Amino acid sequence: MLTLTDIVMRGQAAFEATLPDYFKRQVEPVEDLLPIGNVNLTLTDERQREICLNCPLADCVDVTDPRCPIRVEQRRLWREQNRRRTDG
């Protein structure tokens, strides 16, 4: 299965192949600049149910709403993953 990175790289290569020589990239892209690993922003169904059942909000807001506890937990996990990545 192709990853999003592979799809973007193939699309960029196909686009660059259509350019005149003076517009083409002179050096190869640096692989070190690509993101490290996958970022998992999803919670398990069980964890989502647990958060929903213990929701402190009076009325249920859509999961796309930033106030939703599920979204809050996803942001917390995302920050934690990024902190681990930058700490080395």
Image (tube, rainbow, N blue to C red):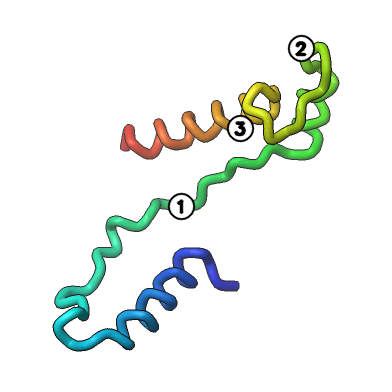
Residue type highlighted by circle 3: Gln
Task: Measure how far apart labels 2 and 1 are at the Cα level.
Answer: 33 Å
Residue at 50% from the left image edge and 51% from the top image edge: 38
Circle 1: is it few (<14), some (14-19), or many (20+) Cα within 10 Å? few
Spot occupied by residue 28 in the image (x, y as percentages of width and height): 22, 73
**Which quarter shows the C terminus?**
top left
Q: Nearer the viewer, mark 2 or mark 1?
A: 2
Query: What mark, if any, has residue 74 been given in the picture?
Result: 3
Circle 2/circle 1 CB separation < 8 Å: no
User: Rounded to the nearest whole Å, what is the CA distance between mark 1 and mark 3?
Assistant: 17 Å
Residue 79 in the figure: left or right of residue 44:
left
| Measured Cα–Cα span from mark 3 to mark 2 | 16 Å
Near mark 2 (Cα within 10 A), the count class, few <14, some 14-19 or many ≥20, is few
Q: Earlier in the sequence, mark 1 or mark 3?
A: 1
Q: Residue 69, how many percent across, how many down?
A: 69, 23
Give the residue type that dot 2 points to. Pro
| Residue position for label 2 | 56
Residue 37 — which label? 1
Depth check, mark 3 against mark 2: the one in front is 2
